[in-house]
Image (cartoon, rainbow, N blue to C red):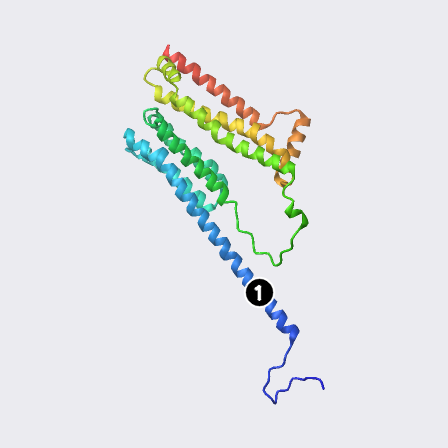
Amino acid sequence: MSKKPTAMLGIMPEFPGVMRAGVVQSTLVAEATTAPKTERRWRTFADVVAFTLGTNVWVSIVILPAIFVGSLHGTWRILAAALPLGVLLLGLARRSEGILLGLFPAALLVPIAVTPAMASSHVYGPIRFGLVAIGVVAYLFGVSFFTSFHEPPQPRSIRGLSSASVGPAERWQRRERVYWMLTGMSLVIPTVLIAWVNFDDAIEEYLGEMYPGRIALMTTVLTVGAIVLWLAIYHYAFLGVLRPHRTGDRDLVVGLAQTRADAKTGKPRTRFYFAVAIALGAMATLIMLRHVKG
């Protein structure tokens, strides 16, 4: 005899297909509800890390030197000192890596440009310079990692692969060693370059002879020049090594295709004219300073 649902017995009829569909639907709803919560947790954590490390960098590079040299007076100087914090908050509000990693470090140079004595060697001793460098590196690494890292969703099923027990291939191990070497050089080279400009006695004596009374200003100019030089080296040498290995990046592939097209036409790009203009302006400034000194 077949089992039929009857209303007389007050028993709920069984519909296996409907029950399974309901279970699957509830599971999908639970997963969809869990994913936004995980994403919000990671975003909040990334914001807290970026704000904490960024505030530490702002206080170390701007506020403490400004208090030491007594430059926190006047409306413009106070606004210049507060500008990096505003840029940091803007980057956190927009969750923009460009603002946090590019515009915020650039904004830190604005109060130093207003008061060059903040970057003089008697403000930054070697020990304090090392601590500030560690803070800057921690901020760059923290923002780069936590703003781009997201916890992957839990897999519905797991299946072992035979190649998983073998380990990565030799070529990937070589690449990893190269990446770690580039990372180490990215930390050592700018730190040594900036420390050499600020703490070398020969450079300080030379600036004292050439620009008496303006040693702090010229040291700041050399520091900015060292930073620009390092950015150029990093862009063309370090990223130039990594670009051929990122063929899966769609934006990068489009950029490389545009570069090849520009190379075929033989016409310089806009950045070339911009760099030439900056170089001519810097030469004209040095000539004027030498003329004023004479």
Q: Is residue 192 left or right of residue 247?
A: left
Total numbered labels placed on residues in the image: 1
Residue under numbered circle 1: 27
Identify whether 52 is placed above or below 285.
Answer: below
Q: Secondary structure at mark 1?
A: helix
- On the image, the x and y values in percent for residue 141 come to 47, 39
Which is nearer the eye, 5 or 93? 5
Q: Is residue 2 left or right of residue 294?
A: right
**Type of residue at label 1?**
Thr
To which quarter of the image does residue 197 belong?
top left
To which quarter of the image does residue 117 belong?
top left
Q: Which part of the image, by quadrant, shows the C terminus? A: top left
Identify whether 18 is placed above or below 165.
Answer: below
Farthest-out residue, bottom:
8
- On the image, the x and y values in percent for residue 68 come to 29, 30
Residue 194 visible in this rendered orientation of the protein: yes
Which is nearer the eye, 80 or 120? 120
Please rate how many residues cluster around mark 1, counting C-alpha atoms within 10 Å: few if below 14, some from 14 to 19, many from 20: few
Farthest-out residue, right:
1
- On the image, the x and y values in percent for residue 244 come to 64, 33
Farthest-out residue, front:
165
- On the image, the x and y values in percent for residue 272 come to 57, 25
Q: Residue at x 52, y 59 (%)?
A: 34
Q: Residue at x 50, y 39 (%)?
A: 98
Q: Which part of the image, by quadrant, shows the N terminus? A: bottom right
To which quarter of the image does residue 133 belong?
top left
Q: Residue at x 61, y 25 (%)?
A: 268
